[in-house]
Image (cartoon, rainbow, N blue to C red):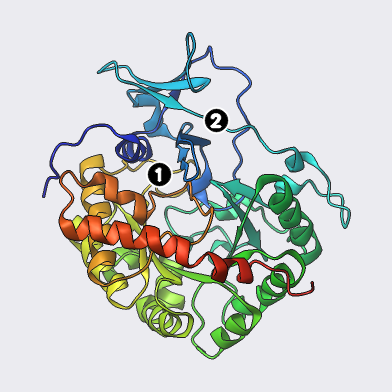
Amino acid sequence: MMPAALPMNPVRLAVDLFCRGMRVDPSCDSLPALRRTRAGLGSGFETRLREGPRPLCVNVPVVERFAADSPWVLAPRVGAGESRHVVVNAESGEVHPLWIPDEPAWYGRPTKSSGRAMAEVGTLQGTYLGVYVGGVCGFWSGRGENACGFCTSGLNVGGPARRPVSVAEVVETARAAKEESGVTFVHLNAGYAGESTLDGIYPFVEALKSEVGVLVGVQATPARDLSRYDRLRELGADHLSFCYEFHDPKVLAEVCPGKNHALGQKAYFDALVHCSGLFGRGACSGEIIAGVEPLAKTLEAIEWIASVGAFPTVCIFRPTLGARMEHAQPPAPEDMVVALREAWNACRRHKVPIGLAPNVRVSLIVQVDDAYELIERPSMADRAWRAALAAGRVATRPVFRKRMKARST
């Protein structure tokens, strides 16, 4: 299944960069540090391929093995232009503007509660704040043989020597990110800690909603006791994401042995169906990794996720340094275009609202609402759905303003 040829618009360029990476010309200087504080997907340069009210944020691979062979090269812009940098295709000669945001001042600021630098507590991944809470994932215990093959969180967040972030540290960091960087959404993720995984997340959700006033997302392994999600809803959690990774159970067993043995797919399916009903359509997502299992299975996953009222988060496989699969090849951009188009189509068919929350622009994926730009000839249904989403963003502003008000005020 091959997509029709597309012009290299910013979204198509994002797909290509995710799949092929980027080399950095030695003449580039004063580039920000690469920060790996969560899982392996956030290992590249935080960039923007489009500025404006809804910027296109992309975390571009630059240190992974496959990036060394990329035709795309980051270079300083020569002469006047809208950006300080460009990305150049050494094969075709194409040139596209690229923005590398300066790191915010609060990154280097110590928290008053502990003295830890705020960038060690949470980092921007696009326009939202990502925070890893709790200890190292249980699947990384021992020699990490049960860890997921694509994951490096056991390396990024450290082992026993690393002290988990505290609620006070996260509150301070989130408040700075909100006040100085305009952050509206804080995404909490945690490693596997058995059935008690959510227990360690509850205090962070409560404090962020009460003391800071932001939208809060939670990404955690599923609880078998589904009543645990009632507590998250009471605390005001706004979004839940479930990383079930692969639709093919054989691929899940091979790539994610710990997750497959301890949980299995059914636990993810049950939790996603339950929470989609509990939190409402579009409030939950099913996260899958595209480019490892057959494309047909990825398309099945996309359809199933949308059919239960959640939106599919399509993560393009990145063979990150330090992961068990670091020597694997990334997927073909053409296949990823097919998957992302289907994510858009599935959400349209099942009327799953996407992209409504204000200022949530994610750099680790191509967002489903941006996948519209991968369609060569949008149909009337495509255009109508896009218009409906735009109207929805306006209509839901009062709802989100209310949800972003600190409860303690």
| Residue at image point 44% right, 21% down | 86
| Residue at image point 53% right, 66% down | 139
Return the mark for residue 100: 2
Crowd around label 2: few <14 · some 14–19 · many ≥20 (10 Å)? some
Give the label, 1 or 2, closer to the camera.
2
Furthest residue toward top: 79
- The one of 4 and 315 positioned closer to us in this rendering: 4
Residue 379: % across, % down: 15, 54
Question: Is residue 302 visible from the viewing direction of this image?
Answer: no
Amino acid residing under circle 2? Ile
Residue 340: % across, % down: 28, 53
Image position of 230 with respect to 139: above or below = below
Image position of 207 with respect to 48: above or below = below
How much space separates mark 1 and mark 2, taking CA atoms?
A: 23 Å
Amino acid residing under circle 1? Pro
Return the mark for residue 34: none
Question: Is residue 1 visible from the viewing direction of this image?
Answer: yes
What is the quadrant of residue 197 in the picture? bottom right
| Residue at image point 62% right, 71% down | 402
- The one of 394 and 407 positioned closer to us in this rendering: 394
Q: Is residue 32 left or right of residue 317?
A: right
Location of the C terminus (image quadrant): bottom right
Q: Is residue 324 left or right of residue 130?
A: left
| Residue at image point 34% right, 26% down | 70
Image position of 82 with respect to 238: above or below = above
Does dot 1 land on a helix, a strand or a loop? loop
Residue under label 1, please give it: 319
Q: Is residue 181 left or right of residue 238?
A: right
Cβ atoms at labels 1 and 2 below 8 Å apart: no
Residue 113: % across, % down: 88, 57
